Amino acid sequence: MRTLLRGGRLAVNDRLESWDLLLEDGRIAAMGPALEATPDCVVDASGAYVLPGFIDIHTHLDDRIGHFELADDYERGSRVAVLNGITTIGSFVTQGPEESLRAAMQRARAKASGRLHADLAWHLTPTSFTEADFAFLETLPRAGYHTIKLYSTYREAGIFADYDRMASLFRRLGPHGFRFLVHGEDDALLSAVDLSALDLTLASSHGRMRSVATEVTAINTLAALAAETGASIHVVHVSSTAGAAAVAQGRVIADLSCETCPQYLWLSDDHLAQPDGHRWLCCPPLRQDPSGLRAFARTGAFEVLATDHCAFRKQDKDAWNHRDIRTVASGLPGLGALPHLAWKIWEGDPDVAALAMARHLSREPARVMGFSHRKGALVPGLDADVVVLDASGVQRPIQASLSDVYDPYSGFTSPLAFRHVLRRGEVVVAHDNLCSPERPSGQLLQGEP
């Protein structure tokens, strides 16, 4: 199948080119001005930006967190993803207390197979570390597994790794090509908070329980460990300007990257002070005025923009004991909002916004995930994941999830229209509609464990 996109402005090497784009057999075949080709299909991209397919590297799908099943399974989550130009998603496999990592991986694969509208890759969270466990982990990069997710807190959930454990993992697994995604909140500082001084019935206490200092301390420690061990570390969901500044300092001495999320760019702790403030609870918590973090984003402080999409049904979000906010299902949906809220950061200059999205929603996410050889750019030979983006559409509401959730971005609108979304050369969205909703054809990017 040969498809020719004509008349668009392509994001290529941090510049926009008025070129044609030729796709063949699922790959990018050629690009340039006025290509001579005999395609099977021509896509009119005139007046639109032609961008590499977006990648959300941080989503939680089809899993159980605490007492609650997530609202979005792989089908529903990947559906809202591709409708908004996200052609690849990264999600998580966490080893349970009574299973092997291999069994956890097989369980996730069974849930996802045949139910994906976007391509999918997993980050792994191992929780046991025998010599046999290490031997198994060391084989996984050959099957396409390049990232390990670690948590510097959450003891009660059984996924906490102290800094000594992290250092040993960095030394043992880093040389095999793994990059480490780390949830950075310092557990010692979190444990030292005097809860008796807080009113735990109020969502507004959440920020005092999980202060900016816990984030900064964790980032500084991770940077030092990365410098000491030579590991590549990606700090997830940085929520504060102080945290972003700590990452910037860490980059001087180590291979350190980071992401932030739409909630930290556009929402504030004012939401937590509302009578229904528990509906905005997430970790790390919402902070004060987010305009400073947006200013950091405009300077390129965050390599990646991702969502930490963690959607709970309305009934589950409200099912807390009203005495302790720690019983709230903590997490927010974001998949369907990501491109729209990223665009808003740079919307005063549409060309800059388009190039920023190609960088922070495509190229850098592919690099962090270890898939730059397949995804993330308009380059001949790479997968033909392409977004034809019309930035001058009619303003319409943003929808973070298709499930029955409290949408944290209710009231936000966007002019972005997804004229076409192609995944490996196949048109999966045309004029904001899914072409084959009953025929999910996304791929698992990693092999059997």
Image (cartoon, rainbow, N blue to C red):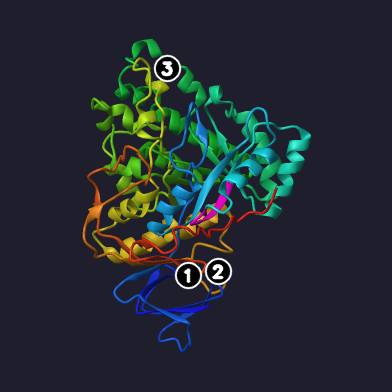
The quarter of the displayed image where residue 320 is located: top left
Decide if residue 438 is on the left or right side of residue 157: left
Give the residue at x 28% y 31%: 269
* Tag 1 and tag 2, C-beta contact below 8 Å: yes
| Numbered disc total | 3
Decide if residue 5 is on the left or right side of residue 163: left
Cα distance in 3D space between marks 3 and 1: 48 Å
**Image location (x, y in percent) of residue 210:** 40, 26
> Which dot, 3 or 2, sits closer to the camera?
2
142 or 100, nearer to the observer = 100
Give the residue at x 34% y 69%: 49
Q: Is residue 398 above or below residue 216?
A: below
276 or 208, nearer to the observer = 276
Decide if residue 215 is on the left or right side of residue 222: left
Q: Which residue is mark 1?
A: 378
Q: Look at label 1 and name its amino acid.
A: Leu
**Image location (x, y in percent) of residue 287:** 32, 33
- The residues colored magenta run 116-122
**Image location (x, y in percent) of residue 351:** 30, 66
The quarter of the displayed image where residue 102 is located: top right
Q: Which residue is mark 2?
A: 382
Q: Is residue 259 above or below residue 218?
A: below
The disc label shown at residue 193, or none:
3
Q: Secondary structure at mark 3?
A: loop
Decide if residue 254 is on the left or right side of residue 77: right
* Tag 3 and tag 2, C-beta contact below 8 Å: no
Q: Earlier in the sequence, mark 3 or mark 2?
A: 3
**Image location (x, y in percent) of residue 231:** 62, 44
